[in-house]
Amino acid sequence: MNSNSSHSQSSSNNSSRLTSNDKFHDECGVFGVYGHDDAAALTALGLHALQHRGQEACGIVSFDGEHFHSKKALGLVDGTFGDAAVINLLTGHAAIGHNRYSTTGESGIRNIQPLYADMDFGGFSIAHNGNLTNAMTLRADLVKRGAIFQSTSDTEVIIHLIAQSQKKTFAERFTEALKKIKGAYSFVALTGGGQVIGVRDPNGIRPLVLGRLGDSYILSSESCALDIIGADFVRDIEPGEMVVLNGKGVQSSYPLAKKPERFCIFEYIYFARPDSFMEGKSVYESRKAIGAELAREAPVKADLVVPVPDSGTPSAIGFAEESGIPFELGIIRNHYVGRTFIEPSDKIRHLGVKLKHNANRAYIKGKRVVLVDDSIVRGTTSKKIVEMVRNAGAEEVHMRISSPPTKYGCFYGIDTPRTEELLAHSMSVQQICDFIGADSLAYISHDGLYRAVGEARRNKKTPQYCDACFTGDYPAELTDNENKRSGDKVTDLRERRASKKS
Amino acid sequence: MNSNSSHSQSSSNNSSRLTSNDKFHDECGVFGVYGHDDAAALTALGLHALQHRGQEACGIVSFDGEHFHSKKALGLVDGTFGDAAVINLLTGHAAIGHNRYSTTGESGIRNIQPLYADMDFGGFSIAHNGNLTNAMTLRADLVKRGAIFQSTSDTEVIIHLIAQSQKKTFAERFTEALKKIKGAYSFVALTGGGQVIGVRDPNGIRPLVLGRLGDSYILSSESCALDIIGADFVRDIEPGEMVVLNGKGVQSSYPLAKKPERFCIFEYIYFARPDSFMEGKSVYESRKAIGAELAREAPVKADLVVPVPDSGTPSAIGFAEESGIPFELGIIRNHYVGRTFIEPSDKIRHLGVKLKHNANRAYIKGKRVVLVDDSIVRGTTSKKIVEMVRNAGAEEVHMRISSPPTKYGCFYGIDTPRTEELLAHSMSVQQICDFIGADSLAYISHDGLYRAVGEARRNKKTPQYCDACFTGDYPAELTDNENKRSGDKVTDLRERRASKKS
Amino acid sequence: MNSNSSHSQSSSNNSSRLTSNDKFHDECGVFGVYGHDDAAALTALGLHALQHRGQEACGIVSFDGEHFHSKKALGLVDGTFGDAAVINLLTGHAAIGHNRYSTTGESGIRNIQPLYADMDFGGFSIAHNGNLTNAMTLRADLVKRGAIFQSTSDTEVIIHLIAQSQKKTFAERFTEALKKIKGAYSFVALTGGGQVIGVRDPNGIRPLVLGRLGDSYILSSESCALDIIGADFVRDIEPGEMVVLNGKGVQSSYPLAKKPERFCIFEYIYFARPDSFMEGKSVYESRKAIGAELAREAPVKADLVVPVPDSGTPSAIGFAEESGIPFELGIIRNHYVGRTFIEPSDKIRHLGVKLKHNANRAYIKGKRVVLVDDSIVRGTTSKKIVEMVRNAGAEEVHMRISSPPTKYGCFYGIDTPRTEELLAHSMSVQQICDFIGADSLAYISHDGLYRAVGEARRNKKTPQYCDACFTGDYPAELTDNENKRSGDKVTDLRERRASKKS
Amino acid sequence: MNSNSSHSQSSSNNSSRLTSNDKFHDECGVFGVYGHDDAAALTALGLHALQHRGQEACGIVSFDGEHFHSKKALGLVDGTFGDAAVINLLTGHAAIGHNRYSTTGESGIRNIQPLYADMDFGGFSIAHNGNLTNAMTLRADLVKRGAIFQSTSDTEVIIHLIAQSQKKTFAERFTEALKKIKGAYSFVALTGGGQVIGVRDPNGIRPLVLGRLGDSYILSSESCALDIIGADFVRDIEPGEMVVLNGKGVQSSYPLAKKPERFCIFEYIYFARPDSFMEGKSVYESRKAIGAELAREAPVKADLVVPVPDSGTPSAIGFAEESGIPFELGIIRNHYVGRTFIEPSDKIRHLGVKLKHNANRAYIKGKRVVLVDDSIVRGTTSKKIVEMVRNAGAEEVHMRISSPPTKYGCFYGIDTPRTEELLAHSMSVQQICDFIGADSLAYISHDGLYRAVGEARRNKKTPQYCDACFTGDYPAELTDNENKRSGDKVTDLRERRASKKS
């Protein structure tokens, strides 16, 4: 049944994203604090440090021992939670928060997380980074049994699973619900009992780390959000692990059957902030290593190595160091372009990428330039950048990409175009090179990428990642997708979303 | 369990109502249209005509044959639905709407009606005028069975009852749900099948009328909302009747056991607009008849009959005609005072009633004045008005009230203070007269009121009203209230709300 | 030179006035307080009581002995000054305020009064009710001498006249400026020396009264604004009089040559609030007297006297009393329609007058109805009201108007259509009667009007008013208008404005 | 005398700048277009590219041959002018625009440029980058002669000088006005005749360049704003030169007496965007050259060269290249911190610099780090950054600054603290080193700076800059400042502003 889509909230701002940068996008960042008087203020700061994981909306739910308090809003963290008056209403020693990247035109505010529900045993709030691959299937079943959904979010499924569970304790109910869901998830949750809970899916696809600030414990998508509040990094939460933070400290358990670890390799390439550590490895260091590997795999005679700002910078430094070609800021970024440029004029729109980037003519003119970027998705931005660099007088433009060709869509919480829209799905590297107008184009090889990021993982037996976007090898079952193919009337919300964007 | 109250939405506007006029307040107006291309525009106009029944928030849900469209907002109807761009998004040939009077500080936007839910069989939306007297009891049970409530509204109970019903057809499910609820209700609902449904509770406590505009059918709380769109009044919906408006016209049924008819007599006294007809009788005519009856019951030698604007005007005209004392606008109302004056300065606050009313000195000075008002609730406004009239030079001030003393709170959808706060609950008429500082005070008698409003009902066998606010004789069971008294942990949301307001 | 019009402020809200009620409109109310710690709060209340004189914008300027403080905004007084935080910034013991009715699309915020200027001798602020009839002529001359105008307001002329004066004292400068201006004006001004000054033009066309609250003095357009703050009415300011309120009390002087007193008679008919006294006479009483005179002049056999709400009510009561025909609220007004209904949908627009008024069918059906209204301007509203009353079943509809036919535009601060657009300018009474579809139509006679409002003026020798809108006899020279006719390039801002509205 | 300050606009947003980055700040960017149908759209883009020169407010005035159109607003360019509806109102083939950095609490919207005035000869609009050093002195005189100022902006003085000029032609009037003003200015102006005019002060302190786009001509503070619209760079406007852009092309004249060229050297160090060319030299190249010079002047044994993002990056690259020490992103910037973080909570405030920067621990730990920044103003940020880098495990922290010590305030349009607040005014380099906690600190020498930026100027005879902030040698007279010292009652607005901020 697809009544889910039948209720649209009228929304007056139909924004078109001028500055959408033709990248894959992380859909969420999560953060939680237990045991600090300023739990909400710390959570606001944590979300601010995780802002790169989602800029569309943010929310915080706190618990003061008796009542839950909630504030959710569209826009950046500092716009809402930079206001002391807002923070002061979010009282309590425990809080969780969420940044969201993306939404559909039809969902609006009701999909902002953390979600909250009153249940038989009290209040419950949850924030989610990832995507459940059997959410639609579960939802259809829950609706048949009388559940009323308020959002189109896959995350709401877990709330109804808990609410309908007939188990006695909250822990049993939550575990029962977790056993039913599939896909990628790093949850932080807050219970009426005042506990903060973190869970990572059995493949450990999305990140989640544990930190400590004095007597308080912290959960965060990335370690950079521990730094902002001066908290210490303790460890990564393990795949399939559940941690409960309460007055007794941190209790760890493994309620779910073990699966092979498959951490998202794209976190190293693009999603994570370079100052974060993930699975024991510095993201910045990984990117430099990828750049160096790329310089070895695909060397080129050139005068300058120029990063496509800002994501290409660490790989470009690595490439420059390895190749001995000077590193220069050959493209200057306008720092005042956010990712949201609402309703631009058509007159502005056609000028495209220049709103954001400008060639640094003084250095480009007459030079052979190596551009380093992290990925090519649809290729539109790359094409414009190559053209801009040529127009600034470059003699040659060589593009080097710090990921293998992205050929497959992601079902684990990353916003990607449909597979058919991915340039590398239907074009060879040479065809892409021609399309973007470069003199040469090279991607890092799959093996090269593993070599680059694998070094820091030598203590683990089988270094293995989720690299489905390059290989199509999806570690967690795509139940909704399969049901859909087999003719079931399960609505794939993600599909609908994608089609809306075109 | 009272977890219901444990989730507060942070709200930045703590409004205090300066101009709250010490009246009972209707909590809602409902409106619905089936079979018109401009269903939402007509609904907006209908709600505008019903604005006196609720000024705090308004909402419209439409259905276009495939999708539901919804817009809800705080504030007056014209503020939101006076905008063509908003109306144009609410496409479809069927729509329902709702005006709300009152809300608690802790509920905000999520309580605005019409409520909407995706169910197994499709979308469902409902708007409610009235109050369910067993909502908390039902809610506690539903939550135990896994229902997740999104609002603190009693109306949401009916949605979950429908969702959890195991009956096959929507009609059976709705009927099953109706059989479980108690209290006062006039519902208008909109189904995924595209039908508009109206239901009135078995006692017929709250009003609901049927109208027709060409081939379209209309449901409305009052007939004045038919006039605004040029629709014809067809008839009152009967107590306990359900009407279904669809492509086949109007189907009527009586799914509930019959009960004695007990229409709210206060609709005649104050709530309804004077140009409406209710249960076959003109509201304006009823008020004039009450005024005339009052002149006979409590005559007084005086020079002027002065209405307390604006609700006292028809009764004052009736009083003046019957007594032969001239009718004069001895109190002038400032038309630019809405019912909401957000965050007034303390310096303004103490000036109180003058923001709204001023004595017309030219006519008051040296005169014996009869003031006619519809009711005295806490007495604060009456006291100030008597004082203002005296300060303007009146020799005598006689107060006449067109209702009997209001001694009991209402549980059927009217916002009243708690019984203990009602002046007439603890004071005699003479004590009230002394409190407000009048030279004399008289209320219409209970029998006089029935005589005045009963004339038009002579064709019905037992003319009987809900007059519980005067008598304490509540026609529909007060289940939640009784459960609460008997020690159950049922939270009385209404109580909590009342206490917040003080 | 007409560069004045060459600078447009882009404005995003192009409002169309749905509820414009086809009346003449007063363009301003003014208020001032000297000698009270809460001067701004009192001014806010005064402006609230004068809200009927202008609803588009409002402003207050206060002086704290050292600094001026200013707040001006579009919208109603309570929207801006109902906020204690705003009032608290307007410190000082002296304040002046202004309500504005009307603006052009091209002026926006910079035309909101009080205007303020830094001058050689200190700050100066002024608020104006009226219109200067030689403003454009003076302005052209001032611009030639280097003055830079910031608004299109005629009021700004007086500021530049003061600034450019070479006299030594402020009093001399102000007097010199006053001697140059012509037309209608009631000024309240605030000087850097901390004085509040009131001036009324030599014909006394617009009203201005003096009040007292303890040791403080008040200036106000109408006495009703004294009542709201509990101040006593002292007297009308005389035509041509200047009063200075300062620490020494009230100093009166007559700096201008005397002219015949010509108070605007339309203040009695429509503009003023009925609870105000003007030139010694109650406005309510005047309106009743006009109604009674009308009943004598134009009697009719009928069953009901029905006021067109709300302005027709006092005259209707007077008509009913004199004629013996019962007074009834045969037309019900929706109290939730303000005068601004921004961007209504076209679907709503065509429904016209019903948004505001509804016939009270119960009383209209089968009756002969006398409608009493204060004026007919373009006739569009009257036509709709007659039609509405007929559709509600009236057997006969007789229209009685409490003013003579309005044949000429006003140049003294009232917003009127151009002379050519006035129905009575080109139609006979019978033609107008046919146009609006009434069974009979009568206006009060010119003599009858004088009789009705003259009674209270028997102590004055030659009771004479400005009645130019009926007679074309303009008491103050129309310099700009004449210059324009004689081919000079003086821009008539009023004309331009009028043409924009069509 | 100083009534200028006596009029405060009540402002509700008292923002405190959390993220103020302890730098000198440019106060303005200007842009103008003549001869393009999309003049306003091009201007919006130009202002966007100049956003780094002022983020507080922006405005555009266009001229369509008959009317001027204006839009000004607080906030970033894309927030206001990213909206096509706004741009579409700004019709015409000529437009000028302005970005403003800084304002006083008391000025608000009326100080936003371009300023506009109606004059005898028509409309006139002007935008200004710089500061007039005799504005207060001229203003006092103008006010005495009847001028009424609307802003506290020094720029308004030039408008009144033009308005009061008795010369016949506009050109003569403008020239007369220019001859009276002193200080630093790059003006772009727009006249009722439809010309766009650019003027640069005789010392050429602030930049202004000429560009061309097809048949259209452009004026801009920096060449990077030509790139964004694809315009060609033509040349720098010369010191003391006036250019008039109209239908005949570009007319150049030199109305003012020649003075020694003294371009602001800090434009190279910090203000300008690295992709701009100024006075024939690439800003990026200049910064790299400064870094290289610094490496030669103040070498240090270290493992990493780390820029303080983002302004230190080009110098750091230059330092790294020259020294052979690897360049690394050892400090990561959060891209979502704007320069305005309104009303942060105190709980957030104390966390200070981490909101914006985080140490990249993976690379810092155990390393000897050279930090490269462009300047130290108050030293608070530097102190925090050194501490952050140490806390991340650095063994040594050496600070290198790409400007000489900033010891004197600027009077030419740069927002600097008062001289007394400048760290280098009262501390030696060693004391500053101790204060910020570095292991060593070196500034580039004055000679070294000239060497670094001088290379590109070898064709000019006496390469000389305004370097008053290092030397106290002010090229243009500080008239207001001297008048103030000599006891005159001239209000120094800049001083007042500074004191408000503390």
Image (cartoon, coloured by chain):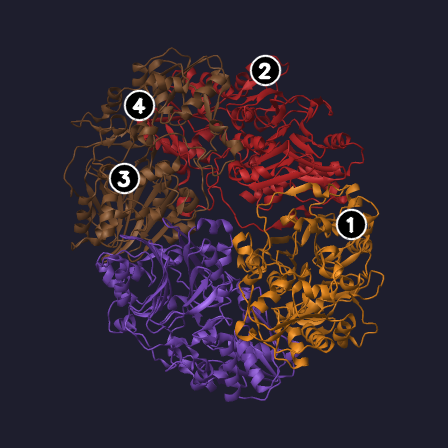
Chain colours: A brown, B purple, C orange, D red
Relative horizontal placement of residue C136, taking residue C61 as reference (left or right): right
For badge 2, the amino acid type reads Arg
**Which residue corresponds to mark 2?**
D457
Task: Give the number of the mark in front: 1 or 4.
Answer: 4
Q: Position of residue B274 (x, y in %)?
A: 51, 72
Marks 1, 3 in one chain: no
Q: Is residue A339 left or right of residue C207?
A: left
Question: In this rendering, do the residues under marks 3 and 2 share a single chain?
Answer: no
Q: Can the viewer see residue B111?
A: yes
User: Residue C227: image x %, image y %?
Assistant: 63, 71
What secondary structure is found at the residue carrying circle 4? loop
SS at mark 3 in the image: strand
Decide if residue D160 is on the left or right side of residue B36. Answer: right
Q: Is residue D484 visible?
A: no
Q: Are marks 1 and 3 in contact (CB under 8 Å)?
A: no
Gap between marks 4 and 3 measured at Cα: 23 Å
The residue that label 3 is drawn on is A131
Residue at 33% over, 43% down: A98
Q: Are marks 1 and 2 on the same chain?
A: no
Q: Residue furthest top?
A: A301
Residue where numbered disc 1 is placed: C161
Say which amino acid is labelled 4.
Pro
Quadrant for the C terminus of chain B, please.
Answer: bottom left
The x and y percentages for residue C104 are 66, 50
- Marks 4 & 2 on one chain: no
